[in-house]
Amino acid sequence: MASYTFLSLLLFSLLLSTFHPSLQQNTLHGSFPLTSAPLSDTSAFKARYLSTLAAKKAAAAPFGYNFHSSFKYSMALIVSLPIGTPPQTQKMVVDTGSQLSWIQCHRKSPRQQPPQAPFDPSLSSSFSVLPCNHPLCKPRIPDFTLPTTCDQNRLCHYSYFYADGTLAEGNLVREKFTFSISQSTPPLILGCATDSGEAEGILGMNLGRLSFISQAKVPKFSYCVPLRTRRNTVSPTGGFYLGHNPNSNTFKYIKLLTFPKSQQTPNFDPLAYTVGLAGIKIGGKKLNISAAVFHPDATGSGQAMIDSGTQYTFLVDAAYARVREEVVRLAGPKLKKGYVYGGSLDMCFDGDAAEIGRSIGDMAFEFDNGAEIVINKERILDEVGDGVHCVAIGRSESLGVASNIIGNFHQQNLWVEFDMNNRQIGFGAADCSKSA
Ligand SMILES: *[C@@H]1O[C@H](CO)[C@@H](O)[C@H](O)[C@H]1NC(C)=O
């Protein structure tokens, strides 16, 4: 009898422990407003370029070591997230192209109000530093390119140079993201930048084991980039979901491509969201580009990725040349000769953007299974200043990379869902300003 009671108790507690998590929603989820805004000058996001550079230095050799750091008013996707205990709201750039997350970390001055104020570790009970003997603090971790050292305080210290030559440094730390009383992550490994200045951090969202989604075990996330124009005085607001997105029944999915370990050649980023881009259409006409140009070759060149952290779209030469040819054929006489914006965009125009858009027509990025991202003719040009408008596509070589990158300009008014469990990416047309 006693054993029977024991068994049923055991069974009961097993049942409880099985059902509790699903009732309590053990995985992190939630929705947040997302803005598409120019980065502040001191953004930690700049750091990304250096680590990407370091990793790709060898690979970039055919192009020389010539990196155009960024567009001065680079548009980034920014969310405000509650970090620490009690939570301090921090602005972070959502970056599907990088791994480690960073926050600006030092004592608040009394004038600063959230979310502009940096993160003040002394006000958080869940903050801790990563000690030197942590494996991450050993040099040469294979999947982690950040150079770390053990500092004189026995803390894991990093330092790097921005593309513009300024030095940034800080420590690796652990801190929780605290969304509500019932929802917080375990302490996650983050970079804690000690530069002065108020700036955005980075939410590293790639497939690496140290990215936010991997550490927080978020199985999927999605964002909707609102339309932007230079005339917006306030940044328009779109949406960002961790976990399930209630609009996902309208999404079309494409598979993420996976590659054997042997594919990990210098030009290849194994932690990126690699998709099977199949072709590009302009004005309804499919350009004569071999699909092989959009798939990694033996050196890893040609990988096609969806990136939230790159503003414009960049194509390898074989594809770029066909796009430019077609744009010249359709709108050549209006082309601003010899003009290059930001070292990359060389299909630019003076004059009436709507008229030029009409003469070029809609564009589409077509994927292996027939799914498309369609760019309406009204949105193929970006105003870069002084009334000049450019087709928002550049040559990958001008960035010093060998990949095809679909940037956030071409993800406006679109839900983009990154689903790690099912290894797929979903797209759903939307009015993102209504998604907040
Ligand atoms: C497409 O391009 C290839 C070479 O890249 C060329 O041989 C072929 O003739 C082109 N096809 C058309 C229809 O222009």
Image: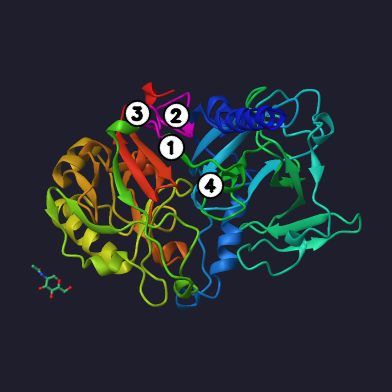
Q: Amino acid at mark 1?
A: Ser
Confirm or deny contact between disc 4 and disc 3 (CB under 8 A): no
Q: Nearer the viewer, mark 4 or mark 3?
A: 3
Point out the tag, 4 or 2, that comes first from the N-terminus. 4
Point out the tag, 1 or 3, that comes first from the N-terminus. 1
Residue 331 drawn above or below residue 304: above
Q: What number is the disc on residue 239?
A: 2
Q: Quadrant of the C terminus?
A: top left
Crowd class of label 3 (few under 14; some 14 to 19; many from 20; radius 10 Å) = few
Q: Nearer the viewer, mark 1 or mark 2?
A: 1
Q: Amino acid at mark 2?
A: Gly
Q: Residue under label 3, please give it.
A: 247
Q: What number is the disc on residue 222?
A: 1
- Label 4 to label 3, Cα distance in Å? 21 Å
Q: Position of residue 284 (x, y in %)?
A: 12, 48
- Label 1 to label 3, Cα distance in Å? 10 Å
Q: Which residues are magenta?
A: 224-247
Check if residue 93 falls in the magenta segment.
no
What's the residue at 21%, 47% (across, down)? Answer: 363
What's the residue at 60%, 64% (across, down)? Answer: 143
Helix, strand or loop at disc 1?
strand
Q: Amino acid at mark 4?
A: Met
Point out the tag, 2 or 3, that comes first from the N-terminus. 2
Confirm or deny contact between disc 4 and disc 2 (CB under 8 A): no
Residue 417 drawn above or below residue 289: above
What's the residue at 39%, 70% (across, down)? Answer: 301
Residue 410 visible within the image = no
Front residue of 420 and 128: 420
Confirm or deny contact between disc 1 and disc 2 (CB under 8 A): yes
Q: Residue under label 4, please give it.
A: 205
Helix, strand or loop at disc 3?
loop
